[in-house]
Image (cartoon, rainbow, N blue to C red):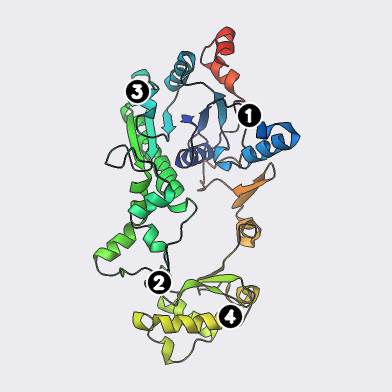
Amino acid sequence: MDRAGPLSHLTVIEFAGLGPAPFAGMMLADMGARVIRIERPVKPSGKQEGMKGGMTALMARKSDVLARGRESVFLDLKSTFGKEAALRLVERADVLIEGFRPGVMESLGLGPDDCLQRRPSLVYGRVTGWGQTGPLAQAAGHDINFIALTGALHSTARRGAAPTPTPGLIGDFGGGGMLLAFGVACAAVEAARSGQGQTIDASICDGSALLAALVHGWRSAGLWNAEAGTNNGDGGAHFYDAYECADGRYISIGAMEPPFYRLLREKCGLSGPAFDAQWDQERWPTQKAQVAAAFKRKTRDEWCLLLEGSDVCFAPVLSLDEAPQHPHNKARSTFATVDGITQPSPAPRFSRTPAAACRPVGEPGAETRSVLQECGFTEDEIAALT
């Protein structure tokens, strides 16, 4: 497997799970790390039997882009052999990542103490919803709950309307997975210097709060209104919002700075003293209604011809199908299609150690035999394990 990238010297053991841990594993694999994913062998249900069911399962696996670029190993971690195999893999690894509830890995005999005893320089990365400690640590939850507790969800509400859940963007992936990947990278740098490992407690709740740092700072200084949807940045300002066009599609405007605001007024015919007071929040509702009426006069494509590429701070609101086809995204290869699945390409970009091209999602358990052979297991032992 091609392992080009700045992390090509690292070996990561990932215990397969949901949400943030696989996202972190994808980021590490994208940057060249060898990520060996330990998966539980699961017998197919009756619903998956037959050609149609098999194809559905295959496409579901291929579309799970968070699992791309891995080597997959089947292990029964509740068995003595499976646990020992996992620990033998840990002995050869630089990083371990897992996303189970607090105490689960300890109950398997694979907690930080067990693994660091085998590999003292190991970076042991953990990500949970609420964190390893605190009164909610053992409670169930999902992305919407974690971002709700930190104020982040409140900031997605329109004035007088309910907050809008985001599909894992703020919590699971930004606040959880990306935070874990950052923590792993930091600890790996330190371990290379000290030779000592450590445990990372990455919490989706903590990460969501971190992503909302600027807004919390503004609120504390009285620069952010308590009422949602009345601020610059949450749809309250007439110069920073998404607007419907004549064809029912949408465009986005972010003309905050005075030169950009002046250009917006010039190009969109927003003349007159009514628009002179850009930052008078009492006028924003009236100004928004007038701006909305102006954008309803042309289609989205017509506004693109007039505004795209200018300093108005403009972009069309593209659908998931449209985004990969936009000329800017195509020029930068922001998206890639692998095995018929369109997905974002690895990022960020490096001048000297670029990442490899976007890699496919492998078959579950495909590398079980080869990885166990690397760890010194005999054919008889591998047969018992599998």
Question: What SS does tag 1 mark?
Answer: loop
Q: Position of residue 332 (x, y in %)?
A: 60, 55
Q: Tag 2: residue type?
A: Arg
Mark 3 or mark 4, which is nearer to you? 4
Question: What SS does tag 3 mark?
Answer: helix
Mark 1 or mark 4, which is nearer to you? 1
Q: Tag 4: residue type?
A: Lys
Q: Which residue is mark 4?
A: 296
Question: What SS does tag 2 mark?
Answer: loop
Q: Which residue is mark 1?
A: 44
**Split into 4 quadrants, where in the image is the C terminus?**
top right
Q: Residue furthest toward the bottom? A: 272
Question: Which numbered disc flags the more N-terminal residue, 1 or 4?
Answer: 1
Seen in the picture, residue 147 relative to 56 is either above or below; the reply is below
Q: Tag 3: residue type?
A: Leu
Report the Cα–Cα distance between label 3 and label 1: 35 Å
Mark 3 or mark 1, which is nearer to you? 1
Report the Cα–Cα distance between label 4 and label 2: 21 Å
Q: Position of residue 375 (x, y in %)?
A: 51, 15
Mark 2 in CB contact with mark 3 (< 8 angstroms):
no
Q: Tag 1: residue type?
A: Pro
Question: Which numbered disc flags the more N-terminal residue, 3 or 4?
Answer: 3
Residue 159, label in figure: 2
Q: Which residue is mark 3?
A: 116
